[in-house]
Amino acid sequence: MSTGKNIGSTSAVYNDVTRSNIESLFPSIRQRIQKSVFISIDTEFTGLAISNPSPVFKFNTTEWVTRATDMAEKYRAMTNIVKTHALVSMGISTFSRRHTRPGSYNVDNFNFTLQQQNSHLINPNSVAFLAQNGFDLNKQATEGIRYFGGPNPKPPSVKTPEINEEGWMIREVFLDIVRRRVPLVIHNGLFDLMYIYQAFLGPLPDSYQSFVYDLSEMFPGGIYDTKHIVEKNDPKSASFLAYLFHKNERIQKQRLEKDEPAVCIRLKDRIAYKPKTVDEQSLPKSDNITNAPFCEQFAAHGHCRNKDMCPKSHDINFIIDCQDLQEVPADGNVAANHGPAHKKRKRDADQDTNGEAQSNRTVKVASSADVNASPNGGLEDMSVSASTDSELLANMYHTAAYDAFMTGYIFASYQILLGDKMADFANQVFLMGQSGNPLLIKPGRYSSLSITFTQTQNMFASTTDVTAPAENNDGNNNGDGDSK
């Protein structure tokens, strides 16, 4: 049926940054960071837990329990994970002012495929998750930007100049974010913060007190965790990222229709929109609240034990439609007697983030790798080509760039909703299992800055004294795998 109402859904197309094009895109990335008023990030990595390690490592597994309630023990366990695993992808979304109207932004999205040159561990569950969500492991092996984790204070210089240059550029991108001194936005992002610190700044401090002190100095604009913000303001709502994104899209559309301040996004650098059309006849009737064709577990948590075999819908827009129509709680709990199970279905609708309805059409998600960068390294706004490949869009939910965009959009939405009260949530990072007790990013009475920070803080001031690394001819290190 094509008579359904249009539901807005924005697909943030990203600029795909690899070892092949980082040099040409590098100036434009830095320009976008310099224009930003806040930046959101997300990362993908090779592990967030240790699982059945080989006895040869002689790990004391009691020191790897990341869900420990004691913060010192939790931080020690997370540090063990981060120092032995690696980043494979980093997403950055830069939000710059479009004009003076509140909530109006230009947004640029960048997805960096990374390849750490230090030997590291890989958790099979994490790699399986990445592969199932469209992450290209072959591309990461052949096109990942090569870097050395834990520079102290500088990464080693190897004989292959391309490796030195790639590592220098990706580190400069991170340092530019620090230099910008604007709010940094994450979603359940403690691991993200720890991984980027270890990858691009230096070895993680021994204590979490020094770690949070370092962060408070690095990001004076504040660190905002959207998961914590949502759980404090709407504790009954599901708080996984994709749900919050689509929910806030609707909230902002409703505000725009009422001529209230609302988020208006201009997605730059390859713009596309996810087509979805909702057939209202397939939705459960408001007087039949027991008919719930969506998966309650997925609606509450963003995952389902049955995965692709689940007979009920995992489509977030469809779930929200059902909840709005039925007034079903956000956790998806409904009566046990459900009607006939509905298969997952694809729906067509199109809506710009500024609330203006688009024509019913399908579009292709593309990255900047599909087009050539302009001669001066700039990124051109591109038109979108037609396609029916909705599976490609589905995979974007766990692309670091798309997750970063969704995180930033949620933050922008809550800036509108909370106004000046948003400042109350600065420097509070969500802790798994301790939703009411966030990690505070501020100096303690007896804490001190770490050695890593004091060795690198002179790099935060400006870029005027920073130069690309020279080729190393001393033969002490070799990035090609040769010994000595």
Image: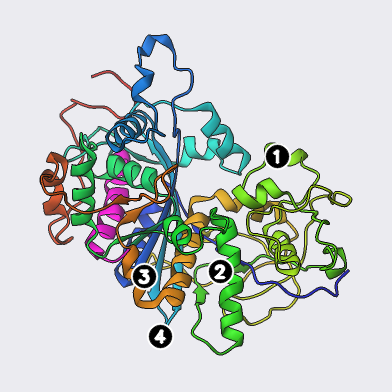
Determine the secondary structure under disc 4.
Answer: loop
Mark 2 and mark 3: Cα distance apart in space = 16 Å
Q: Mark 4 points at which residue?
A: 99
Residue 226 lies in quadrant = bottom left
Mark 2 and mark 4: Cα distance apart in space = 21 Å
Q: Which residue is located at x 35 percent, y 12 percent?
A: 58
Q: Which residue is located at x 76 percent, y 52 percent?
A: 313
Q: Position of residue 35 (x, y in %)?
A: 32, 72
Q: How crowded is mark 1: few (under 14 residues within 10 Å), some or many (20 or more)?
A: few
Q: Position of residue 137 (x, y in %)?
A: 54, 36
Q: How crowded is mark 3: few (under 14 residues within 10 Å), some or many (20 or more)?
A: some
Mark 2 or mark 3: which is in front?
A: 3
Instruction: Looking at the image, tell me whether mark 2 or mark 4 is earlier in sequence order.
Output: 4
> What amino acid does circle 2 point to?
Asn
Q: Mark 1 points at which residue?
A: 307
Q: Position of residue 290 (x, y in %)?
A: 82, 56
Q: Position of residue 417 (x, y in %)?
A: 46, 75
Residue 415's tag is none
Mark 4 or mark 1: which is in front?
A: 1
Q: Residues in magenta? A: 162-183
Q: Mark 2 points at which residue?
A: 248
Mark 4 and mark 1: Cα distance apart in space = 43 Å
Instruction: Looking at the image, tell me whether mark 4 or mark 3 is earlier in sequence order.
Output: 4
> What amino acid does circle 4 point to?
His
Residue toward you, 258 or 165: 258
Determine the secondary structure under disc 2.
Answer: helix
